């Protein structure tokens, strides 16, 4: 048995507890010089300089340089010769000031080191598949397969510590406001109306299934009917949907509901929470009340209901300038009730023909039938459709859009919805490509007055924009049957930097109104009783007016941490294919388990 093996063998057997740490690796300062301390941690970097061994010892609190001098302690120096990267060790020694000129100003512990007189090996380590450092160029699949190593990196540890901090801020905030924290079931009834449910088969009731909650929506409304007028919960939710950088199959919400309130009351509680979180977690004072855009204003100015306003490229409608031109595509779009709109790319007139062709292809990738560009050069306005539009129409378009010489104008014609959505995607992509987005800034706003429903050609019926329990605006109720698409809802979304961070609404609290909504959505009385009879039954016994909101907790932490992916702020995330590479979930199960659940694979 070599000295390293003896040390790791002996360490757990020691009864004198000499390996118990007295300080963390980020704690010691010049004021601690002269103290004898014990530190535990991982070997981050090991350097052998002329016989004296230096090790940067790391834990989640920071790093401390520890020194093994053979003249001071031959035994500890002999032990250190066996230490390698990521070994877990315990050292005891004297805190001393670093020699003149060797202090590290980048480390909080950089003024001192620890001269070791006792060293213990607590655990060996194989060579890790990637460095335990922030700046690494390692395939994400490798990082996720070895997530327990990835989580040793300071960046991810900071993200999870930030997440923990925000948890505590949220709990304190709602406690101060008198909210009651209630845990709602994880095994619930499947009520498909939105994303796909994750289903859980029942062993004791063959052929029946639970669903994992997409949200606690019906439960929190039941809590309002039960008299708990202020409910809150930090809760896990599950949706079986296609994934992307800001979406995971299991995610966390800050979920709240309030009775005897209107939309303004809920929004005030929500935005004051955001202000508290940003102030305490990041030192950023958010001005409240937040600005408000209607859904229509957001779409017509930014092409999305979750606009990123940290840069310009605001959209402009030019229907009045093109409705009587000889360019049939534009004129017919306007006559049929559609939209011709676009935005100005400042200084873009110098784009080459190849660059312009690429922009056309980009617009087509977003669903456009085409893209009309107009360059304002020193020679004047130039466009590929100039002979159809005419110089006067081009000048009128440029005036409507606020363009100047040197600018590039980009135009799309389509239905109202499609034209603005295409332009919104194009605007965002060009904002990224041209570095127009201030990544250090935060922009907060509410989007309100969403449509209550939209017609789905695929399903041949109206579907709820938010969910079936969202209340319509009372002044639009007369349109509910005759023109459902024109009905606005009492819904509201909180948007930060182009991300929907929270969404909520005032709810329907009357059984008759709820049935009316189900009928509009093509849900028969029989189906509504089968799916939601428990909620309708609660409404029969007196339910208060109520409303609420749910925050996407993971997205909020992603923005606070300055990350681009949810996977960097969740301890054990899934891949884009909803897999966990570390523990290989989802996995096959034993035939016996399937038989117990009365399931047969085909």
Image (cartoon, rainbow, N blue to C red):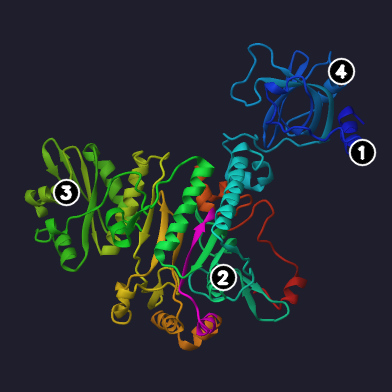
- Residue ID for mark 1: 13
Q: CA distance from mark 4 to mark 3?
A: 82 Å
Residue located at (41% from left, 81% from top) = 513
Task: List x then y, in percent, for residue 595.
Answer: 74, 76
Q: Earlier in the sequence, mark 3 or mark 2?
A: 2
> Which labelled disc corresponds to residue 74?
4
- Residue ID for mark 2: 228
Q: Quadrant of the C terminus?
A: bottom right
> Which labelled disc corresponds to residue 212?
none
Residue 286 as seen in the image, left or right of residue 158: left
Q: CA distance from mark 4 to mark 2?
A: 68 Å
Part of the protein shown in magenta:
535-553
Q: CA distance from mark 1 to mark 3?
A: 83 Å
Q: CA distance from mark 3 to mark 2?
A: 64 Å
Task: List x then y, in percent, for residue 205.
Answer: 70, 81
Residue 501 makes an appearance in the image = no
Residue 324 as seen in the image, left or right of residue 525: left
- Residue ID for mark 3: 384
Task: List x then y, in percent, for residue 83.
Answer: 79, 28
**Quarter-wise, where is residue 122 in the image?**
top right
Q: Is residue 549 magenta?
A: yes
Q: CA distance from mark 2 to mark 1?
A: 54 Å
């Amino acid at each position: 048995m070599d000295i390293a093996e003896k040390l790791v063998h002996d360490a757990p057997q020691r009864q004198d507890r000499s390996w118990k740490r007295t300080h963390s690796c980020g704690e010691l300062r010049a004021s601690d010089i002269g103290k004898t301390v014990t530190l535990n941690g991982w070997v981050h970097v090991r350097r052998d300089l002329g016989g004296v061994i230096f090790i940067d010892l790391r834990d989640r609190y920071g790093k401390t340089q520890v020194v093994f001098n053979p003249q001071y302690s031959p035994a500890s120096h002999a032990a250190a010769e066996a230490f390698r990267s990521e070994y877990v060790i315990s050292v005891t020694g004297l805190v001393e000031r670093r020699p003149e000129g060797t202090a590290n100003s980048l480390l909080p512990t950089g003024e001192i080191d620890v001269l070791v007189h006792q060293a213990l090996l607590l655990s060996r380590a194989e060579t890790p598949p990637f460095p335990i450092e922030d700046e690494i160029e390692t395939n994400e699949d490798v990082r996720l397969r070895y997530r327990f190593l990835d989580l040793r990196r300071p960046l991810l540890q900071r993200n999870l510590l930030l997440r923990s901090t925000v948890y505590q801020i949220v709990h304190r905030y709602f406690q101060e406001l008198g909210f009651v924290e209630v845990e709602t079931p994880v095994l619930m009834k499947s009520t498909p109306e939105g994303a796909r449910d994750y289903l859980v088969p029942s062993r004791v009731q063959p052929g029946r299934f639970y669903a994992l909650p997409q949200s606690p929506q019906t439960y929190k409304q039941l809590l309002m009917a039960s008299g708990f007028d202020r409910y809150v919960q930090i809760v896990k939710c599950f949706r079986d949907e296609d994934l992307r950088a800001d979406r995971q199959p299991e995610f966390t919400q800050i979920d709240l509901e309030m009775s005897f309130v209107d939309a303004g009351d809920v929004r005030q509680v929500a935005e004051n929470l955001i202000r508290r979180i940003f102030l305490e977690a990041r030192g950023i004072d958010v001005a409240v009340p937040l600005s408000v855009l209607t859904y229509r204003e957001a779409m017509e100015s930014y092409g999305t209901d979750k606009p990123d306003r940290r840069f310009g490229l605001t959209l402009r409608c030019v229907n009045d300038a093109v409705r009587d031109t000889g360019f049939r595509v534009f004129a017919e779009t306007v006559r049929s009730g559609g939209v011709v709109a676009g935005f100005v790319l400042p200084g873009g007139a110098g784009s080459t023909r190849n660059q312009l062709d690429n922009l056309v292809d980009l617009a087509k990738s977003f669903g456009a039938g085409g893209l009309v560009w107009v360059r304002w050069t020193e020679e004047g306005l130039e466009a590929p459709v100039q002979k159809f539009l005419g110089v006067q129409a081009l000048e009128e378009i440029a005036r409507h859009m606020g363009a100047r010489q040197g600018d590039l104008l980009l135009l799309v014609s389509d239905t109202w919805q499609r034209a603005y959505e295409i332009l919104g995607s194009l605007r965002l992509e060009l904002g990224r490509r041209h570095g127009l987005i201030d990544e250090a800034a935060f922009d907060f706003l509410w989007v309100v007055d969403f449509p209550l429903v939209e017609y789905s050609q695929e399903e041949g019926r109206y579907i709820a924009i938010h969910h079936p329990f969202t209340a319509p605006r009372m002044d639009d109720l007369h349109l509910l049957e005759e023109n459902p698409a024109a009905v606005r809802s009492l819904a509201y979304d909180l948007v930060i930097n182009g991300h929907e961070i929270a969404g909520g609404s005032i709810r329907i609290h009357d059984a008759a109104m709820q049935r009316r909504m189900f009928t509009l959505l093509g849900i028969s009385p029989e189906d509504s009783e089968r799916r939601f009879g428990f909620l309708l039954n609660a409404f029969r016994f007196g339910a208060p007016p109520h409303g609420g909101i749910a925050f996407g907790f993971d997205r909020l932490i992603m923005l606070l941490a300055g990350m681009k992916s949810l996977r960097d702020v969740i301890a054990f995330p899934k891949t884009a294919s909803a897999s966990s590479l570390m523990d290989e979930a989802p996995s096959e199960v034993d035939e016996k388990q399937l038989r117990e659940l009365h399931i047969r694979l085909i």
